[in-house]
Image (spheres, rainbow, N blue to C red):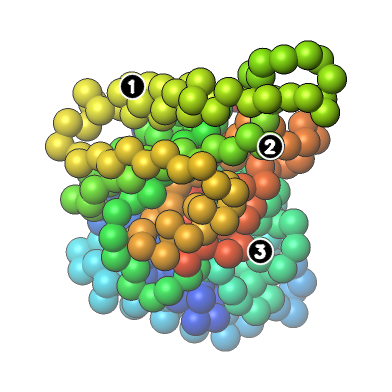
């Protein structure tokens, strides 16, 4: 089993904050930390880079004394380098903002590509500093959502934190059962039946994981609301949000579910996107 946490650095405050989080995550897992910097032009490789890496390594040692740490400078585009490095990692961590190098991650599609096609979970460090509260699991009942639930329960156990399993539903986000004629102008939605179905989905998702993590306190939260709006609001009281890479609904050609993308760009705490089995 891989035993390395990867963190991408470029010297920006955001990437150094990611080093803090990655060091903590490695310590929790009994893993080692690998600090990575990518460069695409030979001119980018200069003594300043090694100074950046040295500062990042010292910061990680300060955050987690005794942690095994190594560092590397890799030639290539950000996405290519991190995808390759993530093959050997239990978790890849990046900052939410930066300059050059890994700072490009949230300035376009790179972070979406990495979350969709990288290897293993991707954590983006963003939102308020030093977030506290429960681990928030976005439950959607998809195959990727099952892998996300595994990760969220494990993360809550590692952190000694409670878990909020939240499922948001509404009548316009998916096909719904209804009574009456086929004319869409005459559709009458059976809200009670729909609510019961979503409650059952939430309960079944959590039940599959409770037995393996009996020490994790779990709160089930079912809300009828706009999905992204509700989850972003809940992120203000969480220390981490965990989401599957692809949910139900949306466009099949999308690299990443729209809810996961919204969390990556707008959540008020770090976000981990977990891919399901290939």
Question: Is 97 placed above or below 33 here?
Answer: below
Image point (43%, 52%), residue name: 241
Residue bearing the label numbered 1? 208
Residue under label 3: 105
Q: Report x, y in % for residue 55.
A: 42, 81
Position of residue 213 measured from the top left corner of the image (x, y, whole percent) = 22, 32
The residue lying at 31 percent from left, 23 percent from top is 207
Report the Cα–Cα distance between label 2 and label 1: 28 Å
**Viewer-nearest of discs 2 and 1:** 2
**84 relative to 185 in the view: left or right:** left
Q: Name the quadrant containing residue 171.
A: top right
State the mark number for residue 172. 2
Point 65% across, 79% down: residue? 99
User: In what element is the residue under mark 2?
Assistant: loop
Quadrant containing the C terminus in the rendered view = top right
Residue 119 percent coordinates (x, y):
56, 40
* Foreground disc of the pair 3, 1: 1
Pick the front one: 60 or 21: 21
Q: Which of the two discs, 2 and 3, labels the residue nearer the N terminus?
A: 3
- Can residue 174 be spotted in the picture? yes
Which sits earlier in the primary sequence, circle 2 or circle 1?
A: 2
Q: Is mark 3 on a helix, strand or loop?
A: helix
Label 3 and label 1: CA atoms lie apart by 34 Å
Q: Identify the residue at horizontal 36%, vertical 62% (top origin).
A: 237
């Amino acid at each position: 089993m891989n035993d390395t946490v990867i963190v991408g650095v470029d010297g920006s405050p955001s990437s150094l904050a990611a080093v803090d989080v990655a060091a903590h995550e490695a310590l929790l897992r009994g893993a080692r930390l690998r600090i990575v910097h990518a460069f695409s032009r030979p001119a980018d490789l200069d003594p300043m880079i090694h100074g950046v890496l040295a500062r990042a390594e010292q910061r990680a040692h300060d955050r987690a004394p005794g942690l095994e740490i190594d560092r590397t400078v890799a030639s290539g585009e950000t996405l290519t380098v991190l995808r390759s490095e993530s093959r050997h990692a239990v978790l890849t961590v990046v900052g939410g903002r930066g300059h050059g190098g890994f700072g490009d991650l949230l300035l376009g599609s790179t972070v979406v590509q990495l979350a969709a096609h990288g290897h293993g979970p991707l954590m983006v460090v963003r939102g308020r500093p030093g977030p506290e509260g429960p681990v928030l699991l976005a439950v959607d009942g998809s195959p990727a959502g099952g892998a996300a639930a595994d990760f969220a329960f494990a993360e809550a156990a590692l952190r000694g934190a409670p878990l909020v399993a939240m499922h948001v539903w509404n009548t316009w986000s998916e096909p719904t059962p209804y009574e009456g004629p086929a004319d869409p102008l005459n559709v009458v939605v059976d809200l009670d039946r729909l609510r019961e179905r979503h409650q059952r989905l939430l309960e079944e998702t959590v039940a599959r994981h409770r037995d393996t993590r009996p020490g994790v306190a779990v709160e089930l939260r079912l809300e009828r609301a706009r999905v992204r709006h509700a989850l972003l609001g809940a992120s203000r009281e969480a220390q981490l949000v965990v989401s599957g890479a692809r949910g139900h609904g949306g466009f099949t050609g999308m690299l990443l579910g729209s809810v996961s993308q919204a969390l990556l760009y707008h959540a008020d705490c770090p976000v981990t996107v977990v891919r399901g089995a290939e």
